[in-house]
Image: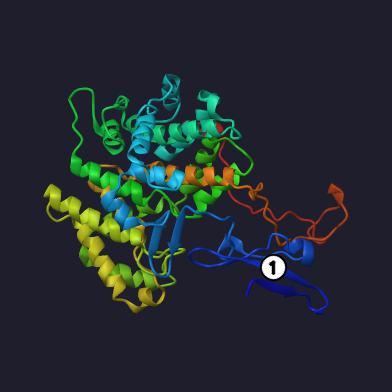
């Protein structure tokens, strides 16, 4: 079948809908001209059955548990590649030649420093501000400091902005951490690789020399690769939507950070570790399983289930292996949280409730444990996710800008509000004529003067 036909109720009219073929996964019915021919729209809240774009970057098969970056399996890339090489792959479509990788690495390394005036931005935040709030403000302000690369119609300026964002996100992220703990900012070093440089800026202090642990660097590399991209998720779709208006890439990435910050998106890894710490011991897990199955109990098992994956998340497989290797190589002994995580996974996968609903561990289930083992505080987990996902966002932004079929995003809606009605004067309104406000009542908002810190 090459197309679909949509007929009206009388059968008198019909609209032909072309079928677009995918190289992997589901084909798509082209509904771009549906409204013109049939005068109806599609209704798909959450876009669970709607392809918002065509893309050659990442492929996810949720039924089989497959994740491919430009056709390469995620586990093979973690085993054999570096994050910078994967960034090149995502951005430009192919694995780089040695000369191409060397130039890309050089460009990234030599763009890691920030404009010095940007550091003053950090001092405008409260010390207890969430690092994501700090990153959001700083990234959003970058266009004011690098106006020479915000013309999205200039291919060279686009590449310069991409280099700057990939290079500067580790510096911005590390400075957000240093500010919250009251330590001086640590500047990047050009003699370190991407992951070692980030760890250096996070954990070194001026009082003593810091040598990045190669085991930590390896785990950091795996973590960044696994979280680099994941097809049309909420934050990536946000970046594409904002970019469709031709907003500059700094604004687009700031929008992606905003979306990722949500607790059911990028914030889920924080919730997993917090949940395990709250449960406290393996002995508490059977009761946690029972509570999770009780629809009247608000408790939920964080890190299980995924919007796309209906089998074991391949990223969780990689993260579980990397975390086990990290503990073994560092000889840290039995980590109680890891033991809890393994037992909780075992209990869930033996329970018909979880198996029948295909609620398998996702990437958040183990990524948070890795970050904790590396020494990152819980409130930094989502920020590190944003650091790694920036490369994927930029790859999609670049693809979107270069797509000749791309138009400014403007979804339709199914309107269910009132039909045309006449204005009622204020003194004539009452609950009996149906014009009373439906604004919910509640406690009065406190005055600004009564709120600590304004």
Q: Residues within 10 Å of mark 1 (few under 14, many from 20)?
A: some
Quadrant position of residue 284: bottom left
Q: To which residue does mark 1 refer? A: 17
| Residue 267 visible in the picture | yes
Quadrant position of residue 203: top left
- Whole-percent x and y of residue 127? 38, 31
Q: Quadrant of the N terminus?
A: bottom right
Residue sitting nearer the eye, 24 or 131? 24
Q: Is residue 313 left or right of residue 410?
A: left
Residue sitting nearer the eye, 392 or 356? 392
| Residue 137 visible in the picture | no
Q: Residue at x 64, y 50 (%)?
A: 405
- Whole-percent x and y of residue 221? 29, 45
Q: Is residue 211 left or right of residue 142?
A: left
Local secondary structure at mark 1: strand
Residue sitting nearer the eye, 1 or 181? 1
- Whole-percent x and y of residue 343? 23, 66
Q: Residue at x 29, y 52 (%)?
A: 78
Q: Residue at x 18, y 39 (%)?
A: 213
Quadrant position of residue 202: top left
In the rendered image of this protein, does residue 94 appear above or below residue 19? above
């Amino acid at each position: 079948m090459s197309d679909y036909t949509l007929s009206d109720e009388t059968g008198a009219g019909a609209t032909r809908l072309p079928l677009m073929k995918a190289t992997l996964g589901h084909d798509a019915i082209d509904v771009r001209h549906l409204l013109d021919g049939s005068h109806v729209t599609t209704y798909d809240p959450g876009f669970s059955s709607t392809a918002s774009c065509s893309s050659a970057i990442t492929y996810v098969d949720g039924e089989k548990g497959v994740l491919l970056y430009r056709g390469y399996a995620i586990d093979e890339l973690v085993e054999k590649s570096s994050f910078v090489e994967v960034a090149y792959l995502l951005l430009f479509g192919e694995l780089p030649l040695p000369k191409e990788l060397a130039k890309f690495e050089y460009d990234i390394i030599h763009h890691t420093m920030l404009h010095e005036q940007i550091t003053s931005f950090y001092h405008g935040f409260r010390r207890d501000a969430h690092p994501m709030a700090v990153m959001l403000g700083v990234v959003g302000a970058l266009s004011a400091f690098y106006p020479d690369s915000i013309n999205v119609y200039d291919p060279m300026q686009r590449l310069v902005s991409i280099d700057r964002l990939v290079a500067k996100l580790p510096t911005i992220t590390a400075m957000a951490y240093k500010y919250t703990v009251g330590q001086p900012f640590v500047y990047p070093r050009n003699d370190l690789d991407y992951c070692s440089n980030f760890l250096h800026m996070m954990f070194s202090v001026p009082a003593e020399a810091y040598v990045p642990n190669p085991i930590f660097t390896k785990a950091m590399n795996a973590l960044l690769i696994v979280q680099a991209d994941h097809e049309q998720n909420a934050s990536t779709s946000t970046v594409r939507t904002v970019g469709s208006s031709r907003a500059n890439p700094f604004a687009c990435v700031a929008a992606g950070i905003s979306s990722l910050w949500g607790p059911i998106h990028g914030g889920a890894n924080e919730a997993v570790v917090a949940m395990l710490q709250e449960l406290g011991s393996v002995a508490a897990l059977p009761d946690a399983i029972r509570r999770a199955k009780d629809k009247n109990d608000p408790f939920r098992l964080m890190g299980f289930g995924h919007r796309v994956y209906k089998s074991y998340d391949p990223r969780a497989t990689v993260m579980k292996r990397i975390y086990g290797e990290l503990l073994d190589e560092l000889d840290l002994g039995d980590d109680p949280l890891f033991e809890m995580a393994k037992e909780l996974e075992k209990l869930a996968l033996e329970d018909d409730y979880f198996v029948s609903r295909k609620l398998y561990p996702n990437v958040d289930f183990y990524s948070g444990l890795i970050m904790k083992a590396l020494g990152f505080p819980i409130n930094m987990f989502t920020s590190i996710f944003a650091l790694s996902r920036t490369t994927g966002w930029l790859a999609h932004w670049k693809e979107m800008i270069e797509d000749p079929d791309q138009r400014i995003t403007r979804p339709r809606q199914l309107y269910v509000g009132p039909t045309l009605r006449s204005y009622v004067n204020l003194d004539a309104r009452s609950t009996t004529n149906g014009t009373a406000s439906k604004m919910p009542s509640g406690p009065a908002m406190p005055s600004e003067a009564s709120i600590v810190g304004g």
